Image: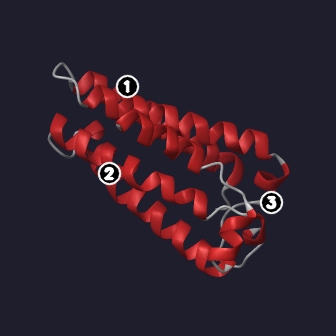
Amino acid sequence: MLKKTLAVATLALLGTTSVQADLFKPEDAIKYRQAIYQVFSAQSSVLGGMVRGDIPFDAEEVHKRATNIAKVAPMLGETYFPATRGVTGSRLQDRAWNNMSDFQAKGQAFGKALGELVEASGQPDFDQAKARQTIGALVQSCRSCHDDYRAR
């Protein structure tokens, strides 16, 4: 079930169909997208705190936070559709729309890194070293997309 959820999460990042345009006004989709990323940020801040040593390492907590991200990630697909391009408040740069195959590849890399973190953190031998490795890979996947496609 979890692997299916993560596969859906990865595909959701790629959603750019006109169906979403019928469900959401572009401005509302941007707010929705930003709210999902706020959930990612809140969950990731705990993971980052553990990697930095600001928060005591807790494997169960890592698994919980990674799973929380995996639960909301599929919702992103509803927020990426062409009518949201250039809408005030969006931080997605035009070059994402102009290079959709790379943008989608970065979404797939995020899904893969997230899946690996969820999977690893659910194992009995998950330790702080593995947490650093898998959380680091997730952060790198986020950074890769942000560096190329997110306005500052």
- Residue 12 vs residue 6: left or right? right
- Residue 142 vs residue 18: left or right? left
**Mark 3 is on which residue type?**
Asp
The picture places residue 62, in percent across and down from the top left corner, at 24, 40
The structure residue drawn at horizontal position 77% and vertical position 68%, both measured from the top left corner, is 85
The picture places residue 25, in percent across and down from the top left corner, at 66, 81
Residue 42 has which mark? none
Q: SS at mark 2?
A: helix
Q: Earlier in the sequence, mark 3 or mark 2?
A: 2
**Mark 2 is on which residue type?**
Asn
- Quarter assignment of residue 152: bottom right
Residue placed most toward the observer, 14 or 120: 14
For disc 2, the marked residue is 68
Mark 2 to mark 1 CA distance (whole Å): 19 Å
Residue lying at the far right in this picture: please name it. Answer: 98
Q: SS at mark 3?
A: helix
The structure residue drawn at horizontal position 40% and vertical position 28%, both measured from the top left corner, is 116
